[in-house]
Image (spheres, rainbow, N blue to C red):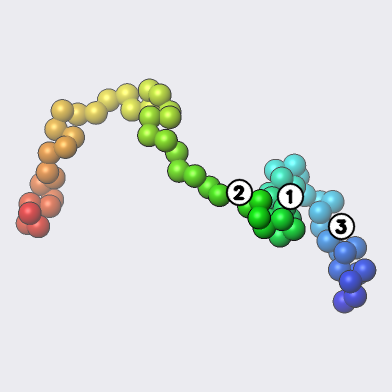
Amino acid sequence: MSLAELKLELYRQIDTLNENELLKLNNVVQTLTHPENEVKKTRGIIGSIPNLVVYMSDDFDEPLEDFKDYM
């Protein structure tokens, strides 16, 4: 397959992608063409989602029965 044929095939495949898939592809292309700008994933900050935990039992930190043999 020649370079021109490869590009044409890629254009055809890209034309069938939806918006979300195009955004993902754009990220991949950006990483390939500009590796110095690669976005590094960061972990979320504890407490960044307020009111996520609605209830936590009083004995949450107590040892579990299942692990008594190992303690």
Furthest-front residue in this view: 36
Residue at left offset 10%, top offset 46%: 65
Alpha carbon separation for disc pair 2 and 3: 25 Å
Kindly indicate the quadrant of the structure image that contains residue 14: bottom right
Residue at left offset 43%, top offset 29%: 48
Residue closer to the observer: 3 or 36: 36
Q: Earlier in the sequence, mark 2 or mark 1?
A: 1
- Residue hosting label 2: 39
Q: Secondary structure at mark 1?
A: helix
Q: Earlier in the sequence, mark 2 or mark 3?
A: 3
Residue closer to the observer: 42 or 14: 42
Q: Secondary structure at mark 2?
A: loop
Alpha carbon separation for disc pair 1 and 3: 13 Å
Q: Secondary structure at mark 3?
A: helix
Kindly indicate the quadrant of the structure image that contains residue 23: top right
Q: Position of residue 45 (x, y in %)?
A: 42, 35
Kindly indicate the quadrant of the structure image that contains residue 12: bottom right
**Amino acid under disc 1:** Asn
| Residue 21 can be seen, yes or no | no
- Residue hosting label 1: 26
